[in-house]
Image: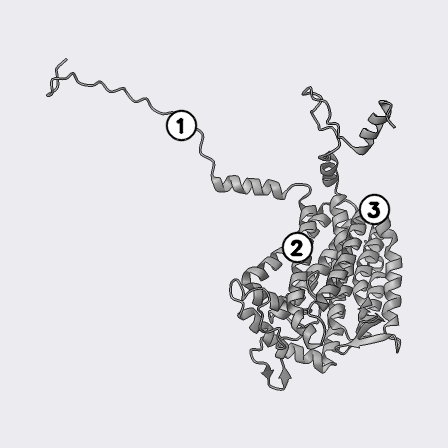
Amino acid sequence: MPGSRTGRPPVQRAVRRPVAPGPPRDNAVRRLYTRLHRAWDRPLTAYYLILGGSLLITVLGLVMVYSASQITALQMSLPGSYFFRKQLLAAAIGTGLLLAASRMPVKLHRALAYPILAGAVFLMALVQVPGIGVAVNGNQNWIALGGSFQIQPSEFGKLALVLWGADLIARKQDKKLLTQWKHMLVPLVPVAFMLLGLIMLGGDMGTAIILSAILFGLLWLAGAPTRLFVGVLSVAGAIGVLLIKSSENRMARLQCLGATEPRSGLVDCWQAVHGIYALASGGIFGSGLGASVEKWGQLPEAHTDFIFAVTGEELGLAGTVSVLALFAALGYAGIRVAGRTEDPFVRYAAGGVTTWITAQAVINIGAVLGLLPIAGVPLPLFSYGGSALLPTMFAIGLLIAFARDEPAARAALSARQPRFGRKRAGGAGRGREPRRWNTMRRRASAARSSGER
């Protein structure tokens, strides 16, 4: 072998073998998408979304009610936390209603439909009795309960229409009567129009719009033909146009759409324009919690109908998008519950509740953004008002009960075992005895067996 220039033998290099092609590398984005898809498709996803989303909206609403209502309370010579304490009390009562509704069986929900409807109709008629009904901001839709507590029966009319309408349509579906247009409309539409008439006697156009949305949602879920659906919608639209043209206040609200100055000709658009000012001054992350400027007398109804504007000013775009995401998650979970159930009543009731909450949130936020006329409806679970909060939390309890009642969700919940006090699965196969907790009862029985007293 010839030597190299340095006198050393040449180094023999190993022959490189061709590398066999291995499995293709999995894309990290695809893996993440697969994990999220599996987590999103779990049986308890709707249950957690409804429970967590409603809880977060309610807690954030309490914080914003406290922040937005302080100046209004002080201007009324009341303690700064006056409205917050009333809202906190309503949230505590509503939590009890939510827990009760979430534990009720479906049969009990259906049994409550007629009593709730009868009670709502009675109270809504009682509002129009002189000396009993109370007018607030020009609308006579309240009943005084004594002191500073008032109740708005029309808010409970939404819950009554959902439960009664769902039970009615479910019974007709069981008897296969929904193929006839008479059974599709009667008595659902006449009763809904009766509720709308009682509401409009007090002048509350916003609540009437929400009730109309619930009615159309129930008809759509029941599979109403297009011509029938369009016919009912046309009649309701014609009545709505007539009611709007007959009121100068409602016509003025329509003229404030897109207004950029507080005074647009002869129309006063102060509230709509200052709501836009509050959102515009918030920026990305807001001016800080409690640092709103518009709530110092510039923005009317800062803690009720326009609390979303104060949220945008203090928490910025990040805060408002978070609220929108929570409502979107709540709406998706409600649609998922309605779509996966085999019980007709559960499908109609879940769809009705989802339509109610989603439509009311869209109307409120659209009015604050200047995209819709100001209808005077609160943001569900978020705005101040116990009369609106109590039936809404009961409706959320309905969705939680329905989400738990899904076959896959029931199986997932029954497969769970408590962390304490019971033998864990697989413990006997591993040769370990079940854990024995040193409770007071165990210590007492041990003392008696040893002869101690």
Tell which circle, 3 or 1, labels the residue nearer the N-terminal end: 1
Where residue 301 appears, x then y in whole percent?
68, 73
Q: What residue does disc 3 label? A: 105
Q: Which mark is residue 56?
A: 2
Residue in the image at 80% along x and 51% along y = 101
- Image check: 15 left or right of 94? left
Q: Quadrant of the C terminus?
A: top right
Would you call the spot at circle 1 few (<14 residues within 10 Å), some (14-19), or many (20 or more)? few
- Image check: 255 left or right of 338? left
Q: Nearer the viewer, mark 1 or mark 2?
A: 2
Residue in the image at 68% along x and 77% along y = 75
Would you call the spot at circle 2 few (<14 residues within 10 Å), some (14-19), or many (20 or more)? some
Q: Secondary structure at mark 3?
A: loop
Residue in the image at 72% along x and 45% along y = 340
Tell which circle, 1 or 2, labels the residue nearer the N-terminal end: 1
Q: Which mark is residue 21?
A: 1
- Image check: 285 left or right of 93? left
Would you call the spot at circle 3 few (<14 residues within 10 Å), some (14-19), or many (20 or more)? few
The kind of residue on which mark 1 rests is: Pro
Where residue 247 appears, x then y in whole percent?
73, 81
- Image check: 265 left or right of 173? left
Residue 227 shows up from this direction: no
Where residue 129 appears, x then y in whole percent?
89, 75
Can you tell which quarter of the image residue 366 is in? bottom right
